[in-house]
Amino acid sequence: MNILLLGSGGREHALAWKMAQSYHCDQLYIAPGNAGTAAFGTNLPLSVTDFGAIADACIQYKINMLVVGPEEPLVKGIYDFFQSRPDLKRIIVVGPSAEAAQLEGSKNFSKQFMQRHKIPTASYAAFTAETLAEGREYISRHSLPVVLKADGLAAGKGVVIANSTEEALQVFDEMIVNKQFGASSEKVVIEQFLSGIEVSVFVLTNGSDYQIIGHAKDYKRIGEGDTGPNTGGMGCVSPVPFMDEAFMHKVEERIIRPTVEGLASENLTYYGFIFFGLISVDGEPYVIEYNCRMGDPETEVVIPRLRTDLVALFAAMDNGTLQDANISFDERAAATVMAVSGGYPGNYAKDKPINIPADLLQNQDSLLFHAGTRREGDQVLTNGGRVLAVTSFGDTIGDAVEKSRNVLKRISFEDMYYRNDIGFEFPC
Ligand code: AMP
Ligand code: GLY
């Protein structure tokens, strides 16, 4: 099978690494990819939202399967675009229809979906410019802290947890009146704040059957001790110690199963990953958000732990045999630590040479995944805020994190930064 993978992050490097190991994978192409993905296939310099160019590449390279890494092409309808073209219809697309991708693309859609299917989530209300006064009134009477969410995609910046009513009203006006996120904040969801421990669960589904392919806890804040601004993710661990069988059972019965049954009953076409962003409130799971893709850097721990052939799983998703797939995991703990450019998540410089010793990965327990990197001649250069992730296996989370840190100590680029305390709550 010839496969085209869309995206350019650490997630895509991890997916490329995994798919390239499959017996079913002939030629692998990555668009646009990064300096790391080039080791497993051919990088194509295409934008992930240029559907016309992607279609041309699929025809030119006789692609059989399109695997979509990031959310933007899904929310913009790449699945539907392929379905609408007789010459592309035969291609297996791993990713949901635009309608179903609203589970991520519209917070209001996902909240309504959860309400319809009685899936536990924070209570909420949604407002627009037409209902501004009601929205202000609702905020004024809301308990604190209160959570405000731009309805649409906002590059991970659309959620604010306000600690005072004044701040909440200001954020509300900024989003709706000043159109902070353009069309994405024309509607704002006001949500009850839930206090607990967050964990994410990953499922592959064809909209009627599903398989759980892993779970992870990520560390979103830039600073050690979970301080400072939010980032795309500074590290992850898996498995998460509190995800015991009893909790997982609740997640499956109250959240995963009703979600997939909801997709089926509403005829929402869904082939691909569902990322359940969950919070455990006193041992009871609630949905914080859905994403219609894998997470980054969650993929960098979830995929290395998955023993099952990923391309075979995608084929099973397509041909209705997902139920019969045999999912197995590496039972060891895994941790990934992300190295970022100084200044990230604010302004940062690009094009800094990265020094990676040739004998970097001497042991079998660590993997290097590129994120924001590109190659120029023999030199790998930084090309983004999150630059690379080192994933390691260990007997404990602490052990895995230690191994990743030891690998990172041997990599350098100007103003490189990483958190030393990933997995700090789980020392052993
Ligand atoms: P989201 O973009 O929906 O993932 O939100 C980003 C982050 O905001 C989440 O990962 C949580 O840490 C936090 N968050 C979102 N909604 C809530 C909520 N209702 N209660 C507490 N924290 C929340
Ligand atoms: N790490 C969070 C995400 O991928 O959305």
Image (cartoon, rainbow, N blue to C red):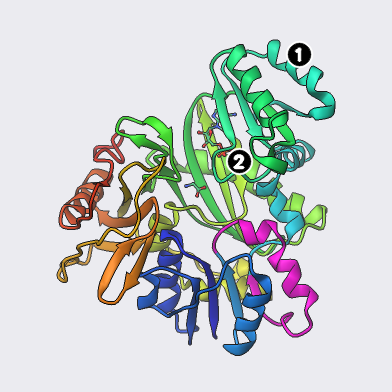
Which image quadrant is residue 128 in? top right
Which image quadrant is residue 165 in? top right
Q: Position of residue 422 (x, y in %)?
A: 30, 41
Q: Is mark 2 within 8 Å of ligand 1?
A: yes
Picture residue at 75% right of the left edge, 62% below the top: 269
**Disc 2 residue type (three-letter):** Glu
Image position of 211 (left or right of 13): right
Q: Nearest the camera: 404 or 257?
A: 404
Picture residue at 74% right of the left edge, 17% below the top: 136
**Disc 1 residue type (three-letter):** Glu
Vertical arrangement, residue 381 with respect to residue 218, above or below: below
Residue 88 on the magenta segment: yes
Image position of 380 (left or right of 44): left
Which element carries disc 1, helix, strand or loop? helix
Location of the C terminus by quadrant is: top left
Location of the N terminus by quadrant is: bottom right
- How packed mark 1 is, by other alpha carbons closer than 10 Å (few <14, some 14-19, many 20 or more), is few
Residue range highlighted in magenta? 69-93
Camera sees residue 420: yes
Q: Position of residue 210 (x, y in %)?
A: 62, 60
Q: Nearest the camera: 1 or 326?
A: 1
Q: Nearest the camera: 51 or 207?
A: 51
Q: Residue furthest right?
A: 130
Query: Could you give the CA–CA distance between mark 1 and mark 2, rounded to whole angstroms?
Result: 25 Å
Q: Nearest the camera: 81 or 294?
A: 81
Among the two numbered marks 1 and 2 on one chain, the one whose residue lies closer to the N terminus: 1
Q: Position of residue 410 (x, y in %)?
A: 15, 57
- The disc at residue 289 is 2
Camera sees residue 192: no
Residue holding disc 1: 137
Q: Position of residue 240 (x, y in %)?
A: 39, 43
